[in-house]
Image (spheres, rainbow, N blue to C red):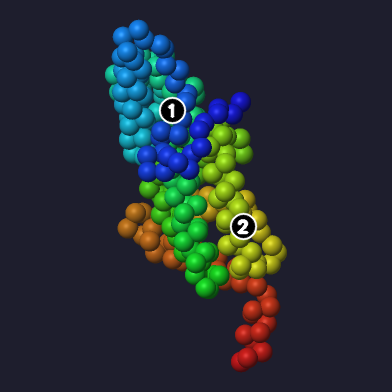
Amino acid sequence: MVTTAPDAAKWIGYPLHRNTNLISYPHSAEGGTVRSDAARNRQRIFEEARTAVIGGESALTLNELARRAGVGVGTVYRVFPTQRVMLESVLEETVRELIDAAAVADGHTDPGRALLDFLRTALLAALARPGLTDVLITGSDETDSLHQAKGELVGITSHLLARVRPAPALTGENLLKLLCGLIHAVSEHPPERQAAAIDNYLDLLRSGLAPPSDDRNSRRGR
């Protein structure tokens, strides 16, 4: 079941707040004290979840999250009904950063440069955000806002691909799956060699995506 979340776009800057409607606040006769306490608890939960996931703990359990945040397990479950919702809520930030990166790359007049600039940014982001590959490649999402963000990312990457005119034609979904493969390939290299590996893989990819007509025209010009 998809968990309803508010419009994610307005939360860019601190995206974990996108799921604030997952908490139900009890009414208080003391002028909102309970709501204020719940808001502080929610903030701690979000911050602990973000720190853990970005630090590589994508498998952090909700029980452990409750311990670190200093709240009851039930409070955590009101914020994140499942561990997957927690992961998606944190990594949606990176997905939306990739959407912005694709839009910036689309400003290049050279279609091939635009696509490679986006892929380079995406690879670096994924290497710095453990768990992103899983979020990108999974077909079923538990939060509406992440599902929407992934749809936007597929749309803009499809546009970048269309500008390159690869043969056979590829979709944005194809590109995201290819990106996940590149992430795995680059991550197999030692950290000091990953930058060179990214360059090599992207050079190879650019050659493979070049339209056949461009190759034929270049041969005629020799």
Residue 185 appears in the picture as rendered: no
Return the residue nearer the eye: 110 or 116: 110
Give me the disc on residue 158.
2
* Residue beneath the point at 37% across and 39% down: 14
Q: Quadrant of the C terminus?
A: bottom right
Residue 188 image position (x, y, % from top left): 43, 51
Rendered image quadrant of residue 147:
top right
Residue at far bottom of view: 222
Which kind of residue does numbered mark 1 sit on? Thr
Residue 40 image position (x, y, % from top left): 31, 23
Residue 154 image position (x, y, % from top left): 59, 51
Q: Is residue 37 left or right of residue 182?
A: left
Which kind of residue does numbered mark 2 sit on? Ser
Nearer the observer: mark 1 or 2; the answer is: 1
Task: Tell me the SS state at disc 2.
Answer: helix
Return the residue nearer the eye: 112 or 151: 151
* Residue beneath the point at 32% across and 13% down: 31
Q: Quadrant of the N terminus?
A: top right
Return the residue at label 1: 20
Q: Is residue 42 left or right of residue 116?
A: left
Count of numbered badges drawn on the protein = 2
